Image (cartoon, grey):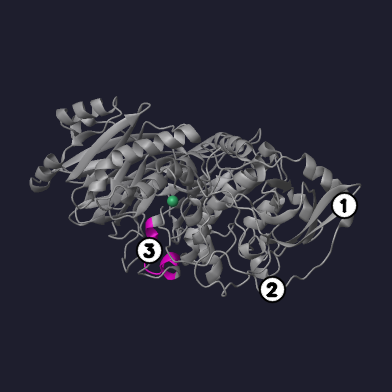
């Protein structure tokens, strides 16, 4: 899903009010570090933009240090920690282990949409394979439409009029028949989860069961911004009972659907048919199986052209859509799709879609929109979809499916395999690009890499927002993703609405979801890449992680282990600082002094760490002759305390010093980052270059 950036001009860089608390010096390590400073060549990073501090800077509230309060201690909050020890299932190096397993769910769905009663009726058959080493005596399914049952947990938790609220809609699933292997079962429903007891236990290592359910639900107008309808347009998702994930980490993942938390589903193949009024055009996940029955010969011909063209081809023109809207047809038509190796399917239908298509590398990229309900920007949506698929394929992992679809509608931004819902936008192409780019970015997380979105927003929205920085900077030359991401995080810090990134999405303050779920994780990953391990190793490691876990279920620990192994760095301090805590980075320069040893001049730069967060230090020194010199110190300098005297071999008389010559280090307090007449920092610029 998408969140728009907050534009609040929050103070980013504000002085800390608390005085230094610890004074220690480590004179004995000077000699060792002198050697270190001499040998170490600073890594030169691309220039980045960091906005100048604005507004009132006196209101900064210092967040509590990590683990200093119960709120910050992950062991003491509601959040579970899932960084288990390595096993045969999950290796210490962060890749799937030799005995890694996951369940499989293959679906056949037949559904019909009654636009008169706004009801969807369906029959789903799920062929479930138990690849686990455990015998299963019951299974759990997600029945998300029950969010709209009166008294649901989600309707109580999120205000009715909020984005995730139910808006007073009363609906939910009705089940008319539930069978396992042909035997009728009485389901036991717990909010949005349904337990089915198996009369015959499901054996391990490949045991199979067939679950069939007949169901119906009323389509909400506002489906908590993940589905819904607008007049004759229907955007349909969470529309059939879906298998909950059974994994080696938690067994059955039964966290309910509350609103903010998204989904965690099993991979399989889908065969689905939707019957709609005859005049409707249906867009959906997967590949249309019966074009001869539902498309005109002219539409099929245009589609064939688009599938070999990188130019946008109208499949249904504006004039044709306008005619279709006024000439409603009697009867129904059934649209049949298949999707392979996905964990969900969704679709949309309307009588008056315009439909554009183009392709890249054999992948059909499509846009469906009602015009002029959708802005003129949508005439570029097929190209924006194509560009996005190409960009992420080339940067991170090849897009693995035959098509990618964008649909305009009332849902602001929501992702499903091969299919995304995006708001109507305006005439400005930029009004939809960010959302199209973001939603299709989700094809990498969580569609290719099947993380548990319901527990870890950062592995879904955060990773995706990290990808989006690359796309934004590539599409709009000169732009930097950094200032917006930092501003959003800073806003949550200032308001005191932060929670650790490990917080389950439904437990994040709704006003801070954009910061904690999306932009802080994206920004700290950029920080890790650019200022800790370097872009070369991080980019390789991140691609390795995607490849290792494509179509699988990684946990946070798998990601942490994977990055540590591939970059060769112990990053415990980084995960603890930025993923498990809410503290911010603030390192400063206390003083600079010089002395001479054996005729050689040295400078001692007294560094001071004001928060719990350590960080590798980079310094730029200005000399009286107008030259500058950069020095690097590893994060290990902070292992023994909050002060460190960095000794450097001085080339001449020092006139000034600056911390962070590359200004995209998220140091919260710039007032203590310089000494004397500091040298200039690198100019701002993109943060995603090599
Ligand atoms: Zn999203």
In this picture, residue 450 sits left or right of residue 126: right
Give the CA separation, mark 1 to mark 2.
35 Å
Q: Which residues are magenta?
A: 145-156
In this picture, residue 105 sits left or right of residue 644: left
Which mark is first along the chain, 3 or 2? Answer: 2
**Label for residue 163?**
3
Mark 3: C-beta under 8 Å from nearest atom of ligand 1: no
Which mark is first along the chain, 2 or 1? Answer: 2
**Mark 3: secondary structure:** loop
Per the picture, the main secondary structure of the magenta-coloured stretch is helix
Whole-percent x and y of residue 361? 38, 26
| Residue 152 within the magenta-colored segment of the rendering | yes
Mark 2: C-beta under 8 Å from nearest atom of ligand 1: no
For discs 2 and 3, the disc positioned in front in the rendered view: 2
Mark 1: C-beta under 8 Å from nearest atom of ligand 1: no
Tell me the quadrant of the picture where the C terminus can be found.
top right
User: Residue at 29% across / 59% down in the picture?
Assistant: 220
The residue pinned by badge 1 equals: 596
* Residue sitting at the far right: 598
Image quadrant of residue 3? bottom left
Whole-percent x and y of residue 324? 11, 43
Q: Residues within 10 Å of mark 3 (few under 14, many from 20)?
A: some
The residue pinned by badge 2 equals: 18
Q: Camera-side residue: 564 or 488?
A: 488
Whole-percent x and y of residue 666? 60, 56
Give the CA separation, mark 3 to mark 1.
65 Å
Q: Residues within 10 Å of mark 2 (few under 14, many from 20)?
A: few
- On screen, 74 above or below 627? below
* Residue sitting at the far front: 625
Q: Residues within 10 Å of mark 1 (few under 14, many from 20)?
A: few
Q: Camera-side residue: 176 or 16?
A: 16
**Mark 1: secondary structure:** strand
């Amino acid at each position: 899903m998408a969140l728009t950036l907050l534009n609040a001009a929050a103070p980013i860089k504000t002085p800390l009010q608390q005085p230094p608390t610890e004074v220690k010096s480590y004179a004995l390590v000077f000699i060792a570090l002198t050697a270190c400073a001499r040998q170490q060549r600073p890594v030169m990073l691309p220039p980045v933009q960091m906005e100048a501090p604005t507004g009132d800077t006196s209101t900064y509230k210092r967040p509590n240090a990590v683990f200093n309060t119960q709120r910050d201690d992950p062991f003491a909050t509601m959040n579970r920690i899932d960084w288990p020890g390595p096993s045969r299932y999950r290796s210490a190096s962060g890749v799937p282990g030799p005995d890694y397993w996951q369940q499989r769910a293959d679906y056949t769905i037949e559904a019909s949409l009654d636009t008169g009663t706004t009801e969807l009726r369906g029959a789903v058959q799920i062929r479930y394979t138990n690849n686990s080493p455990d015998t299963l005596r019951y299974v759990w399914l997600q029945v998300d439409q029950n969010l709209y049952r009166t008294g649901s947990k989600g309707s109580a938790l999120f205000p009715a009029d909020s984005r995730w609220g139910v808006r007073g809609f009363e609906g939910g699933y009705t089940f008319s028949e539930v069978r396992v292997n042909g035997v009728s079962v009485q389901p036991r429903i717990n909010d949005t989860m349904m337990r089915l007891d198996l009369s015959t236990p499901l054996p391990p290592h490949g045991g199979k069961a067939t679950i069939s359910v007949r169901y119906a639900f009323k389509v909400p107008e506002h489906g908590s911004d993940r589905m819904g309808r607008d007049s004759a347009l229907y955007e349909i998702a969470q529309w059939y009972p879906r298998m909950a994930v059974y994994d080696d980490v938690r067994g059955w993942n039964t966290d309910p659907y509350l609103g903010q938390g998204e989904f965690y589903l099993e991979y399989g193949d889908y065969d689905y048919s939707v019957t709609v009024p005859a005049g409707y055009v249906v867009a959906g996940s997967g590949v249309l199986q019966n074009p001869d029955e539902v498309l005109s010969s002219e539409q099929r011909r245009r589609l064939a052209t688009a599938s070999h063209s990188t130019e946008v081809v109208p499949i249904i023109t504006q004039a044709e859509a306008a005619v279709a809207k006024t000439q409603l047809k009697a009867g129904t038509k059934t649209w049949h799709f298949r999707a392979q190796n996905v964990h969900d399917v969704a679709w949309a239908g309307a009588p008056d879609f315009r439909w554009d298509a183009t392709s890249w590398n054999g992948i059909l990229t499509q846009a469906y929109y009602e015009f002029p309900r959708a802005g003129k920007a949508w005439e570029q949506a097929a190209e924006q979809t194509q560009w996005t698929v190409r960009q992420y394929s080339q940067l991170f992992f090849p897009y693995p499916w035959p098509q990618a679809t964008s649909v305009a509608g009332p849902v602001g931004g929501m992702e499903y395999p091969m299919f995304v819902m995006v708001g109507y936008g305006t005439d400005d192409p930029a009004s939809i690009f960010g959302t199209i780019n973001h939603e299709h970015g989700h094809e990498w997380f969580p569609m290719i890499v099947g993380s548990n979105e319901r527990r870890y927003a950062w592995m879904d929205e955060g990773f995706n927002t990290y990808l989006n920085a690359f796309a934004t900077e590539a599409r709009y030359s000169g732009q930097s993703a950094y200032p917006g991401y930092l501003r959003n995080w800073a806003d949550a810090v200032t308001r005191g609405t932060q929670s650790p990134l490990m917080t389950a999405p439904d437990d994040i303050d709704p006003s801070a979801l954009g910061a904690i779920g999306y932009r802080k994780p994206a920004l700290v990953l950029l920080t890790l890449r650019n200022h800790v391990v370097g872009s070369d190793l991080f980019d390789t490691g991140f691609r390795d992680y995607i490849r290792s876990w494509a179509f699988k279920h990684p946990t946070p620990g798998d990601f942490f282990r994977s990055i540590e192994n591939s970059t060769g760095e112990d990053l415990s301090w980084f995960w603890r600082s930025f993923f498990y805590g809410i503290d911010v980075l603030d390192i400063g320069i206390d003083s600079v002094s010089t002395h001479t040893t054996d005729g050689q001049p040295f400078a001692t730069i007294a560094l001071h760490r004001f928060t719990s967060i350590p960080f590798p230090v980079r310094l730029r020194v200005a000399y009286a002759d107008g030259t500058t010199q950069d020095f690097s110190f590893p994060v290990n300098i902070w292992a023994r305390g909050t002060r460190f005297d960095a000794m450097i071999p001085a080339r001449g008389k020092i006139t000034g010093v600056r911390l962070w010559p590359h200004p995209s280090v998220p140091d919260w307090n710039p007032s203590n980052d310089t000494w004397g007449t500091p040298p200039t920092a690198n100019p701002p610029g993109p943060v995603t270059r090599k």
